[in-house]
Structures are given as structure tokens and as C-alpha cells.
Image (spheres, rainbow, N blue to C red):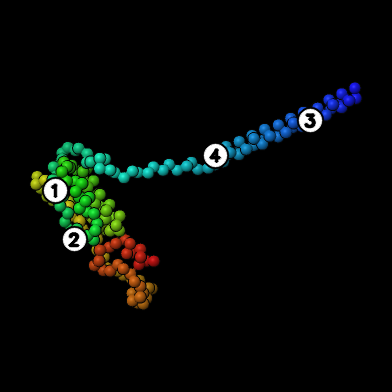
Amino acid sequence: MKSSILVLTVFCSVASGSQTADIADQQLIHQQARQQALEAQLAPPPAEVHLSVPETGESAAFAVETPCFPVTHVVLAGTENFPHWLPFRRVAQQGENHCLGDKGISRLITQLQDQLINHGYVTSRVLVPPQDLRTQTLKLVMIPGNIRHIRYTPDSGHYIQRITPFPAREGKLLDLRDIEQGLE
């Protein structure tokens, strides 16, 4: 009988020990779940990132507009003021052989303007002069943004003008990259 009581006592203590371990594990799991929920509430929501896909030839087609003007040729005036390697002609050709309305012409101007900005010519502009579109020729004028004056402050000293290799010069086409290089 004493041995059966001893076995029963050992069994009860083992059972209660495993119950205590189960309760401790459950408390730990609940505490971790609460901690994760709290962190999820305090953490800022992830930023939504949408990458734009470059336009292809098919999606680059101009929308049908009313009224529209048939354009068989786009003439760019003022390109001689910019480096010859800029792809203005290729961009302008996108508008040829289309019937362009206000939005189509604006889109073409925006694409040319974006080319200027992407290459650092942030003060240059593309304009539409008065014209007769019955000729089916769209004329666009590219106005260069030239540097008029470079002024040094009195605090800069005269030696800065002589030793600083500032690539931007008065009368030269303003290129943002030249200004950035000069400020470094």
C-alpha cells in the first residue's frame, strides 16, 4: 500500500509539473501574441510603391480628340542652341502622322520638355508659336535658358573668381549639372 501511495504521489507531482509547464507555455505564447499585436499597431503601415512602366510604342499612341489637326510633320526651331546628341527629333517624330488636338500637342511638348529637364536644362522651354495647322505642319520653338549673370557675394573674395573652376559661364546654356559641379 505504501508503494502504491508513493507511486500515486510521484504520478501526481509529475502531472502537476507538466500542467505548470503547459500553463507557463500558454502564458508565454499569449504574451508573445500581445507583443506582436502591439508592435503591429505601433508600426507605420508599409508604403505602397507603384512603379510606372515605360511607355511602349503601342501605349504611346495619341488619344483621339475632337477637334484635332492632322500633323504630317513636326518642325523644331531652336535645337541648334542645344547639344546635337539630344534626341529631340526622335521625340518630335512621335507626333507625326497623327491627328493631334490640344492634349496631343501638350503631350508632345511635355515629352520634349522632359528631355530638356532630364539632361539638366531646367530653365529651357518648349513653346508653340502662332501658326496655321491647315498646312499639317506643327511648329515648336525651343527656347534656351541662358545664364545672364553670375554674381559673387562680397564675402566670397576675389580669389574665388580666379581659382574656382566653375563650369557655368555668363551667356552659356544653363545646365543644372554644371551648377552642381561648381558648387561642389
Looking at the picture, how far across and down is residue 79, in whole percent?
Answer: 19, 58
* Disc 4/disc 1 C-alpha distance (Å): 59 Å
In the picture, the quarter occupied by the N terminus is top right
Q: Position of residue 138 (x, y in %)?
A: 14, 49
Q: Which residue is mark 4?
A: 40
Spot the residue most to the top: 1
Label 2: how many Cα within 10 Å (few below 14, some 14–19, many 20+):
few
Judge whether residue 20 can be spotted in this image.
Answer: yes
- Please identify, in this view, whether the residue under mark 3 or under mark 2 is nearer the observer: 3
Frontmost of labels 4 and 2 is 2
Q: Residue at x 37, y 73 (%)?
A: 156
Question: Under tag 2, what secondary structure?
Answer: helix
Instruction: Please state which of residues 47 and 147 is positioned toward the viewer in this rendering.
Output: 47
Kindly identify which residue carries mark 1: 73
Check the image and report above or below for 141 versus 26: below
Q: Residue at x 50, y 43 (%)?
A: 44
Give how far apart the Cα atoms at labels 1 and 3 are: 94 Å
Nearer-N-terminus badge (4/3):
3
Q: Nearer the viewer, residue 152 or 8?
A: 8
What's the residue type where badge 2 is placed?
Glu
Neighbourhood count class around disc 4 (C-alpha, 10 Å): few under 14, some 14–19, many 20 upward: few
- Quick one: label 1 or label 3, which is nearer the N terminus? 3
Tag 2 residue: 80
The three-letter code of the residue at mark 4 reads: Ala
